[in-house]
Amino acid sequence: MPYTKIVATLGPASDSPEAMRALIKNGMNVARINFAHGTHEEHAKKIADLRAISSELGIPVAILQDLGGPKIRVGDLPSEGVSLKAGDLFCLYSEEGKGDKRGVSVTYPELPDEVETGDPILLADGLLELEVVDARPTCVECRVVTGGVLTSHKGINLPTRTLKTSALTEKDIKDLDFGMDEGVDYVGVSFVRSAADIRMVKDRMIGRQAPVIAKIEKHEAIANIDEILEEADGIMVARGDLGVEVPLEEVPTYQKILIRKANALGKPVITATQMLRSMVDSPRPTRAEATDVANAVLDGTDAVMLSEETAMGAYPIEAVQYMARIAKKAEETFSYEHRLKQHPEKDMADSVAHASCVLAEHLGASAILAATASGLTAKKISHFRPQRKIVALSPNESTVRELSLYWGCTPVLVSSPKDTDALINSSARAALDHGLISKGDLVVITAGHPIGGAGTTNMLRVMQL
C-alpha cells in the first residue's frame, strides 16, 4: 500500500458491509461520512458496520464526520429545471415558494441585506453566473451573465462577499453531538472562514474531543490560512467550492501553498474533489486525473480523497485501487531527502523523531517502530517523510484510528507494557506478527521513558531482529 493515505466517501454505492470490506482491503484508510445527506440512524449503521469489519480484518480505519455547514442553496424548481439565458432577469427570493423561470427561493433569507448592485452570484458550482441588479427586502433581482439549466437545491456562492452565517448551523450542532456520541475520529468543518469557526466547533466538543479538519473552500479561508492552521488539527483542500470562490486558474497554486503550509506545521492535509471524477461512470480514470493524483502526492499531501467516485459511482472499489496504484508509483519519485534536511524544532521529541529518520535512512533499516500512547511520536516522524515504513504501536484504539490519516503510518494496536524493555520487545513482536517486518530485519525503535506519558519521546534504539 502507498504511504499516502486514501479517504473514501461512503454512500449508496459503498455503504453495504460487502463494499466496506472490499474498500478496506484495497486501501481505504479513512471513511468519510457526508452529513449533508442521510439520517442519524443511517449513519449509526454505517459506523457500526465499519467498526465491526475493521476489527474483523485487523485493519484500523478512521471515520471522518464531514459536517454540512452553512451552504446556501436555491429552493424547489420544476423537476426539469429552468433554462436561464444571458440577459434574462431572475429573482432570488428570501421567502419560501416554488420557483419558476422568473425566480427561486434561497435558504438564506438575509441575502438581500448582504449583497449590493454589481455583485456576482454563482450557481451550481459556478456553471451559471448572475449579477445583482437590485436588492429588495423580498427579492435579489439579478441579470443572467452565464446561462444554463438550473435545477433544485443547487449551491450558491458569493465570491466577493463575507456573509454573516454561523460556522455551525442548528443541524450541524445536532450532527456534531451525534458524532461525538458515536466516537468519530475526525470532524470536518465546512466553509471555514477564520480560526474562530474552528474554536466554535471545539467549544461544542468539551469533554469529547476529536481532531478538527478545516475544509479550505472559501476565499476568506485563504486570507486567514495561517491562523486557521494554528487552531485546526489538519486541513482539507476542498477544491470544489474553492474553485468557485477563487479564479479557477489559481486553484493549483493554492493547493501547493496549502499543502506546504500544513506540512511545515506537521498537520495532516487531505487533497479532495474530482480526483478520479470520470470513474463515477468509467472503469478507468483519465490520464489527466492520474496526473492530478500524482501531483498531489508529489506536493506532499498526507491523503487523497474520493467523493462521488465511491459514494455513488459505478466503480467504487476500482477507484480505490487506481488511487492506491497511482499514489504508490508517484512516491517512487518523491523527494524524501529534502524533508530530512529540514532542522527539527528545538524540543526533545522532535529531535528524536528527526534522528530516527536520519538513522533509519543511513543504516538502511526496514522500518521505524514508534511506540506511542498519544500518537505524537508517530506524527512527528511522519512529518519528516522518511523513506521507510512507520509502524506506530499504541495501546489506545482511538490513537490507532487517528494515525490512519497520517502519511506513512501503519498503526497497530498493542497491549500496555509494564516497562521500557517490555515495550520494545512487544513492539517488535507485534510488527513481526502483522507481517510488517521479518526476522533478521534491522529496525529503529523510538519510545518514551517513563512509558505511558504523552510527548515524552526521549529514547532511540537500533535492533536486529
Image (tube, rainbow, N blue to C red):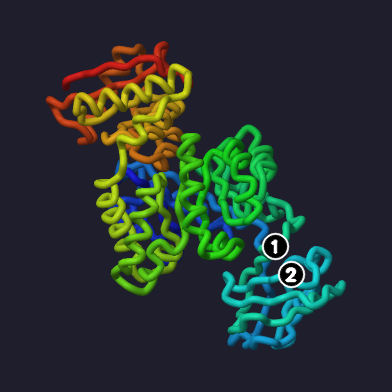
> What amino acid type is highlighted by mark number 1?
Thr
> Is residue 59 or residue 190 the one in the foreground?
190
Q: Which mark is residue 160?
A: 1
Task: Find residue 408 and report its horizontal and vertical position in percent.
Answer: 33, 39
| Residue extending farthest right | 137
> What amino acid type is highlighted by mark number 2?
Asp
Residue in the image at 36% along x and 34% along y: 339
Is residue 37 visible in the rendered image? The answer is no
**Residue 306 picture quarter:** bottom left
Counting labels gives: 2
> Is residue 267 or residue 345 the one in the foreground?
345
Q: Residue under circle 2?
A: 119
Residue 231 as seen in the image, left or right of residue 346: right
| Residue extending farthest left | 440
Q: Mark 2–mark 1 contact, CB under 8 Å?
A: yes
Residue in the image at 64% along x and 71% along y: 122
Residue in the image at 74% along x and 58% along y: 163
Residue 215 as seen in the image, left or right of residue 129: left
Residue 2 as seen in the image, left or right of residue 364: right
Whether residue 224 is situated above or below residue 321 in the rendered picture: above
Task: Find residue 113 and report its horizontal and vertical position in percent.
Answer: 83, 65
Whether residue 304 is situated above or below residue 129 in the rendered picture: above
Is residue 307 visible in the rendered image? The answer is yes
Task: Find residue 279 and report its horizontal and vertical position in percent.
Answer: 36, 69
Q: Which mark is residue 10?
A: none
Residue 365 as seen in the image, left or right of residue 313: left
> Is residue 181 or residue 59 the one in the foreground?
59
